């Protein structure tokens, strides 16, 4: 994405957005950023991010390096120096648009948010977590002193401390889930906004293509009738006919209009998938076609399925059965599909790097199968032919914060949240079946009417 493309993209968004290089060069900003700093856009051009924040350059570089090397959104904090001399503490969300390579620096999109405007849920949670952390510390200190005085009291203090630690852990997990939910909400809003902005001009083009094609055919018919009655045109007209190659132009213009129609229909399909994935314009609970949710998720992940110089193409095999519409939380169900499919792609990429997996390296596949178990239950199976999962790892897959990925690549919350969505929200089942070196299969079973 070039800075110019970024500005076109950012104009439709009300949030402060910065496009920076991996070294901290400000490449582009939108108006909410200039309003936040009290500066004009020209005053920011060619500057470094370090010039507008109070944090050290070393800290900023470390944060940008984390953004450059991660596929996930990295949360950080900046203290901005405004034009009037005041400072403003902001929470930042950084995502890499163009990963670093030997030929080009990383392009990082930073979203800023005034920390004083953060959700009251986060503020209350942070206060409670701080209070409980202090209480745990106090209890631990009291435990050491009470050991000498009374064994029974020591046991009670230890039990109380353990209870507080469990509560603290639960609140920390809740805080992380709120951050994840906010990220998904921001992604959904951004996707819905982009889809809306694309849909209007595409609909205008698609609607006029039919009339433009009809008008062109009318003009070409007129030319053909004219040739029938005036078979020997003047030299000037004959010369122009030969110059534009009229015999080739007449059939080719029809093909040209057909290709434009196919292209606009493709864009409309992509926009429909984006809107289907975000589900922001629909009720939270409704009846939906599960296959549409799976297909829209595959459309979002299509760039990761395509062949790259280090990875072969990942083939998706669909075995869809006839399913009824399911009453569910469609946005959350799409989030489950996203988590499981993204994990399957990661597994196949890891398999491609393993020389022992020649078959997978040459033929990576994801198979998606749906089935109507009975009139009350449906089943969705997502299987890959990657390296598989051993029993020790499989037993911990749905535990919070458990991950086998490198630091910065995974949070350990994707499958935990997916399990909660399927089991708690939809009263269904989520299981993983795997044999090492024979791939992994995730099986989702949900009631047709699980949500009232």
Image (spheres, rainbow, N blue to C red):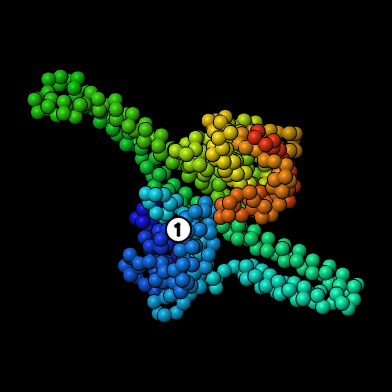
Dot 1 lies on which element? strand
Depth check, front residue: 196 or 99: 99
Point out residue 336 in the picture as x, y percentages from the top left corner.
63, 46
Residue at point 67%, 72% (across, down): 130
Q: 21 or 334, which is in the foreground?
A: 21
- Name, please, the residue furthest toward the bottom: 85
Above or below, 79 relative to 372: below
Q: Is residue 449 visible?
A: no
Q: Nearer the viewer, residue 153 or 72?
A: 153
- Quarter-wise, where is residue 255 in the image? top left
The residue lying at 65 percent from left, 35 percent from top is: 437
Q: Which residue is mark 1?
A: 109
Dot 1 crowding, Cα within 10 Å, few <14, some 14–19, many 20+: many
Q: Quadrant of residue 122?
A: bottom right
Q: Position of residue 69 (x, y in %)?
A: 49, 54
The residue located at (47%, 36%) in the rendering is 307
Q: On the rendered structure, is 34 left or right of 150?
A: left
Residue 314 visible to an observer of this rendering: yes
**Position in image of residue 134 (x %, y %):** 71, 75
Q: Is residue 21 above or below residue 127?
A: above
Q: In the shown orientation, is residue 296 left or right of residue 164?
A: left
Using the image as rendered, state which of residue 113 and residue 399 is in the foreground.
399
């Amino acid at each position: 994405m070039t800075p110019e493309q970024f500005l076109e993209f950012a104009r439709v968004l009300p949030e402060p957005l910065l496009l920076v290089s991996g070294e901290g060069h400000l490449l582009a900003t939108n108006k909410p950023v200039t309003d936040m700093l009290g500066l004009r856009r020209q005053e920011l051009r060619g500057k470094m991010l370090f010039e507008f924040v109070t944090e050290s350059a070393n800290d900023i570089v470390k944060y940008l390096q984390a953004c450059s090397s991660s596929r996930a959104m990295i949360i950080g904090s900046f203290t901005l120096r405004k034009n009037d001399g005041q400072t403003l503490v902001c929470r930042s969300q950084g995502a890499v648009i163009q990963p670093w390579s030997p030929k080009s620096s990383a392009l990082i999109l930073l979203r800023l948010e005034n920390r004083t405007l953060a959700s009251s849920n986060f503020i209350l949670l942070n206060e409670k977590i701080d209070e409980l952390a202090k209480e745990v510390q106090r209890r631990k200190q009291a435990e050491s002193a009470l050991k000498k005085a009374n064994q029974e009291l020591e046991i009670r203090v230890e039990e109380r401390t353990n209870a507080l630690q469990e509560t603290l852990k639960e609140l920390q997990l809740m805080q992380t889930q709120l951050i994840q939910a906010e990220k998904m909400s921001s992604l959904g809003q951004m996707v819905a906004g982009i889809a809306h902005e694309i849909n209007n001009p595409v609909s205008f083009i698609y609607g006029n293509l039919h009339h433009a094609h009809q008008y062109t055919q009318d003009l070409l018919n007129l030319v053909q009738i004219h040739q029938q009655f005036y078979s020997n045109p003047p030299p000037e007209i004959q010369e122009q006919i030969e110059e534009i190659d009229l015999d080739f132009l007449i059939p080719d213009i029809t093909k040209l209009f057909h290709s434009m129609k196919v292209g606009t229909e493709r864009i409309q399909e992509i926009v429909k998938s984006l809107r289907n994935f975000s589900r922001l314009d629909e009720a939270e609970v409704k009846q939906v076609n599960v296959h549409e949710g799976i297909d829209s998720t595959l459309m979002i992940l299509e760039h990761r399925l395509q062949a790259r110089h280090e990875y072969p193409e990942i083939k998706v095999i669909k075995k869809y059965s006839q399913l009824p519409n399911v009453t569910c939380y469609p946005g959350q169900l799409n989030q489950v599909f996203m988590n499981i499919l993204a994990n399957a792609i990661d597994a196949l990429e890891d398999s491609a790097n393993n020389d022992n997996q020649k078959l997978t390296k040459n033929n990576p596949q994801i198979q998606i199968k749906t089935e109507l178990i009975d009139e009350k239950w449906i089943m969705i199976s997502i299987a890959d032919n990657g390296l598989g999962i051993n029993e020790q790892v499989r037993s911990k897959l749905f535990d919070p914060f458990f991950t086998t990925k490198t630091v910065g690549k995974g949070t350990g919350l994707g499958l935990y949240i997916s399990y909660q969505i399927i089991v708690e929200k939809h009263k269904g089942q989520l299981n993983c079946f795997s044999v090492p070196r024979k791939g992994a299969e995730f099986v989702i079973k949900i009631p047709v009417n699980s949500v009232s």
